[in-house]
Amino acid sequence: MKKILFAALVTLFIGTSAFAAPKDAPYKSVSALKKAYQQSNQITWSKYESYQKASLEEAGMTKEMFYTLDGDLIGISKTFAYDKLPKNALNQMAAKYAYPEYELVKCIEFVNADNETNYYLSLSGLNEDLYLQINEKGQITVLNN
């Protein structure tokens, strides 16, 4: 499950190719989306080797829902304001990953199927790019080292 989650999150940072709901998209994920987002006709699908992703625009923000190939929810992601991170994380970020040495590229909130929230940050550094995971308590984990 961690491999699927990590692959899904890497996809968020790299970009994807989208297309309309595939014929082989599992019924339960398609019907759940239709029920939850009746007002939106702009749902696009991307399918990968071990998961699929549905994207939609809601209130000017892109929301992405990740599903197993069987249609079970893995989690939901959306962009997130950096200053809304847990205070402990903001303090650590200011000390260890400060601008101009590191520049924030993307900040994403990810809520998994168990309703646990993590934040994922993409930072561009002078000598390296970093991907960080921050939990609800503000603990930071470097993902790519």
Image: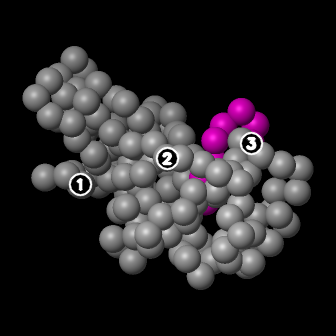
Q: Badge 3 is on which residue?
A: 58
Q: Nearer the viewer, mark 2 or mark 1?
A: 2
Outermost residue, right side: 39
Query: Which tag, 1 or 3, sits closer to the chain's start?
Result: 3
Tell me residue 143's x, y (percent).
23, 54
Q: Residues within 10 Å of mark 2 (few under 14, many from 20)?
A: few
The residue under the point 65% across, 51% down is: 19
How far apart are the two marked residues, 2 and 1, measured between alpha carbons?
20 Å
Is the residue 73 above or below the residue 14 in the image?
below
Q: Residues within 10 Å of mark 1 (few under 14, many from 20)?
A: few
Q: Badge 1 is on which residue?
A: 143
Tell me residue 42's x, y (percent).
77, 46
Q: Is residue 16 left or right of residue 126?
A: right
Q: Is 43 part of what is drawn in magenta?
A: no
Q: Is residue 10 left or right of residue 20?
A: left
Q: Nearer the viewer, residue 101 or 8?
A: 8
Whether the residues at callouts 1 and 3 have beta carbons within 8 Å, the answer is no
Q: Badge 2 is on which residue?
A: 16
Q: Nearer the viewer, mark 3 or mark 2?
A: 2
The residue under the point 33% across, 71% down is: 3
Query: Which tag, 3 or 2, sits closer to the chain's start?
Result: 2
Q: Nearer the viewer, residue 96 or 5?
A: 5
Q: Describe the element under mark 3 as helix, strand or loop.
A: strand
Q: Residues within 10 Å of mark 3 (few under 14, many from 20)?
A: few
